[in-house]
Every structure is written in C-alpha cells, then in structure tokens.
Image: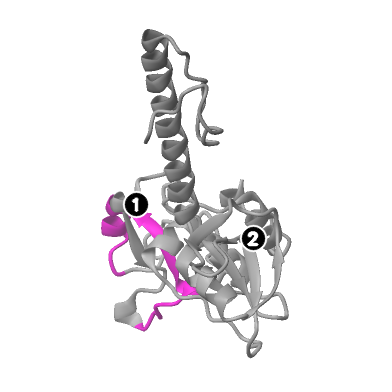
Amino acid sequence: MALVRHDSQPRSSLSCAKLDRNPLFSIDNLFSTINCIRSRKALALEKRVELAMHAILKLDVAGQPRGWLSLQEAISAYARNDVMYGIGDPLPTVFGGIQRLTGVRSSLTLQPIIALDGRVFDEFTPPLSNRTLFRRDDHRCLYCGNQFARQELTRDHVVPASRGGKNEWENVVAACKRCNWLKDCRTPEEASMPLLAVPFRPNAYEWHFLAKDRVLADQMEYLSTQFRADRQWAH
C-alpha cells in the first residue's frame, strides 16, 4: 500500500488515521492504519466463517420443511432463481467477484429460511439415526433417567430385535450402556425396567430441529410452531 501525504490526492477510504508531515507521526499513523485494515479483514473473515457455519432451512412452496442447505447450496438456488420466497432477518451479505464490464461487485443477501420451487410431497418419513434419537430423548437414558454424553448412550429396542421388534422410532429409545446390558433381550416389563417416557416418531418440523446442533432464532420460531407438544429438548 502506498504512503499518502497530506498534499497528495484524496486518501483511500481504508485509511483509519491521517498521516502527519512529521516522519515519526507518519510512521505511527501508518502502523495504526495497517492494524486497522488487518482488524477489518479479520472481522470480515470472521463474518464469512460464521455465515458458512449457518445452515439454511429449506421449505417447499407449501411451507413444509424439506431439509437443510449449506451456504453454497443456498447461493446456487438463488442463482438458478429457484427461491420463491424467504423468511427471517437477513444474514450477513455474501460478496462475490467484481464484474469486468461494470466494475460492480456482486452481492447476495440470504435469509435463514427459503422456499424452493418444485413438487410438494404430503408424506415425510424422518430418517432414524442415533444422533437424532439421542436428541429426541434429551440424551437421557429412558430407563434410569440419567443424562449422558452421546458416546455413552446406545440405541435400545423396546421390543428386542431378536424377538421381532422393529427398528423404528416407536420401538427405540436412548439407553445407557449399563441399562442396555441389564435389560438384555427382554421387554421393559419382563426386566422390571419401566420406560420413563413413551417413544414417538417426530414430525417433519421436530425432526429438522433434532437434525441440527445449531438452529437460528428465526428457524427455531418457525419450526416450533408445529411441535406436537412442549418438548423439553426445545428449550
């Protein structure tokens, strides 16, 4: 970056301090300017990283949640003109390259929830995984009632798989390793280990919340309106 004096042309807008004619003051102000530029670049990078960590909630045109999009996937949807409408406070602006003909830098403002054009499906089957299962049960063993880290929990079949029990939401619960071992291949009644809650299949809105560790306030507000009960894990 060139050093700009008082008697020269107008300074760059990036300058944070005026440069004095005194060489000592000029050097001090130059370092101050450099540090300011670095701070701005660091802040911009931090915003880009933070934005990249956000997931965009995808809806169909009827407003039903249909998945989570990465930042790049959302930008591509805007570029294809697939976005029908958006919901929620705008996220930090995403900047692209500078157009050669106009010299204008492209930019795009995303919203945390977007509806894409396409077919509307009435049915939604929530995929079952340990991650979403443990979140559904609040990382709590439904036999002893204690909470555990994810790696300390197991998926237990209420009606054991060896006895025809299905691997579906209504027949699986989170269980600590000890309780799973104690229950063995028995039903809760046979093992005298009653369930503390009834296992349930989450609807589309509940499942989309369970599937993400970080949910923005606007996304949470939208999804929670269709929760079928006051879920403890939603607070």
Query: On residue 111, which mark appears?
Result: 2
Sequence-wise, the earlier of marks 2 and 1 is 2
Cα–Cα gap, marks 2 and 1:
31 Å
Instruction: Say what secondary structure mark 2 lies in.
Output: loop
* Residue type, mark 2 in image: Gln
Q: What residue do we see at 64% from left, 60% from top?
A: 111
- Residue 13: image x %, image y %? 55, 36
Residue at the (62%, 80%) spot, across then down: 81
Q: Quadrant of the N terminus?
A: top left
Q: Residues within 10 Å of mark 1 (few under 14, many from 20)?
A: some
Residue occupying image coordinates x 59% and y 71%: 58
Picture quadrant where residue 188 is located: bottom left
Residue 178 in the magenta stretch? The answer is: yes
Q: Is residue 211 visible?
A: no
**Which one is nearer the viewer's eye here, 104 or 182?**
104
Foreground pick, 185 / 169: 169
Could you say which disc has been placed on residue 60 in the image?
none
Within 10 angstroms of label 2, few (less than 14), some, or many (20 or more) residues? some
The location of residue 235, given as percent across then percent down, is 61, 45
In the image, residue 27 sits, relative to residue 198, either above or below, namely above
Please tell me whether mark 1 sits on a helix, a strand or a loop. helix
Depicted 83 relative to depicted 134: above or below: below
Give coordinates of residue 40: x percent, y percent. 47, 35
Q: Is residue 162 magenta?
A: no
Which numbered disc, 2 or 1, marks the residue closer to the eye? 2
Q: Amino acid at mark 1?
A: Arg
Residue 182 pos. (x, y %): 28, 56
Q: Which residue is mark 1?
A: 150
Magenta span of residues: 164-185
Residue reaching furthest to the front? 7
Q: Is the residue 97 above or below the residue 3 in the image?
A: below
Q: Is residue 188 visible?
A: yes
